[in-house]
Amino acid sequence: MLAVALFWVGLKHPALDLAGARGIVVTVTSLIWCGWTVVSRHEGFGINGVDFSIFDWQIASTAAGNFGYSPIYDVNHFAVHPTFLLLALVPFHALAPSPYWLLGLGALSIWAGIFPLRRLLRAVLGEKPDPAFELLIVLAWLDNAWTGRLLNAGFRIESLTPPLLLLFLAAWFEKKRWLVIVSTLALLMVKEDVALVLPAFAIAASMRDRELRRVAAAVTLCSGGWLWLYVAKIQPALASAGPTYLSFWSDFGSTPKGIVVGVLKHPFRFAELMATSAWWTVAAPSLFLPFLSFRALAGMLPTLVMLGASSNPSMHDYWTYYPVALVPFVLLGIIEARARGGRWAIAALIAAGTMPLFWYGYARAIAPRFELATALEEQRTRAETAPRVVVQTILFPHVGYKQNLRPFLSPDDLLAKPGDVYLLAPDLDSWPFEYDAPRGFSTRLAACGQRTIDPSGLETITIETVCDAR
């Protein structure tokens, strides 16, 4: 649905010519690539059931009448992030429960970003940008390491943020006020941190785009009001405790207010963290051009601060998907450099080409594992009446939505009772445990029951006695 909306918005733009051979080739091949990457990684058991199944089960549980619940961390996930845009998938999931609804959204959201990106390009550069530069910008969007991480993960709620930010930026530069507001509201239904990003950009940009000051004020009021409503009212109503991710900034405090106060009280610690963060992994490949754009830097600043000030290694070191909200502003900075002409235009052309060439995380298809999928389905069916089926997280997206299913997240999950069934694949990704931990778990559990090992690598342990295999 998001992809259809972004596609429609792009297609309706009179300056966007999709009929040309170049436009058709880029559009079709990018769709095939995004789709095949996500499908192959699912069928090849390359999508971990923690990051993906949080949202998959959130939709499935809502469709079954248990609003927002996810067995991943045993929470109502709407109390963690305001991912209310996902409610649009609930009717489809109720008709045909499947992870492919969410996998499709993950692939289509990245692919659909090319349409508002092309609109942004034309709004900044004019109706007929250089074809070579346009192609490089589109490839920089599709092939950079950060959007690649999203495709490799199948879906994260962050998959929706960058294409919607591109739509917001395109609407801003086209001065289409209604579309700025619509994209703002959509972004606020994705994740709470955009409520800081949008006002930062809008306030800064309105200093130059004076005719959009009222729109900037509306964006700021909507963002601030929604952030207060969600944090102060909705989160406490849906959960008995605050979100655990606040511990990512534990150097400064344990509440949003405490963190802000802590930063003000410890400016040298804050400066140290900012200086040692991996912000350069975004800056260097783009030749620092986004940092020289007033608008782009303003939009990047909240994310740079949140990542830099975090004591969580994945955030502070710009691992996984966390920096992806920076990508639209990085592209904007490169495009604005191109608009300046002269040597700036040459630097922008180089930056658009080098941006996708650095760091890890590129979208990568893998070989399907049909034998493992067949064996897993057989064992899952046999265990439908088991009191509890504990599943290694890499297998979790493939086992359906029965209420006796539990993700294997903690050593405490090794406390077993008669009738419990464990489904393990020790040769696959073992996260959140050490790489060789599942093999040891399997051996200790087998002492409490019967173990079968399928040629595909799937191990099934049926517990016969009370067991502590920790």
Image (spheres, rainbow, N blue to C red):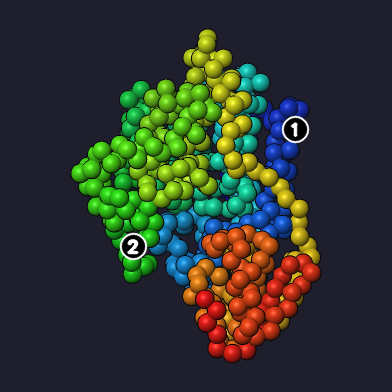
Q: Residues within 10 Å of mark 2 (few under 14, many from 20)?
A: some
Q: Where 287 sits versus 378, above or below?
A: above
How far across and down, in percent of the image, does residue 445 sit?
61, 79
Task: Kindly identify which numbered label has been placed on residue 25.
Answer: 1
Q: Amino acid at mark 1?
A: Val
Q: Amino acid at mark 2?
A: Gly
How far across and down, in percent of the image, does residue 141 sit?
59, 35
How far across and down, in percent of the image, does residue 257 sit?
25, 51
Q: Alpha carbon of mark 1 to alpha carbon of mark 2: how far?
A: 48 Å
Q: Residues within 10 Å of mark 1 (few under 14, many from 20)?
A: few
Q: Quadrant of residue 208?
A: top left
Residue shown at 59% from the left, 20% from the top: 350
How far across and down, in percent of the image, does residue 229 sit?
31, 55
Q: Which residue is mark 2?
A: 242
Residue 68 in view in this figure: yes
Q: Nearer the viewer, residue 429 or 401?
A: 429
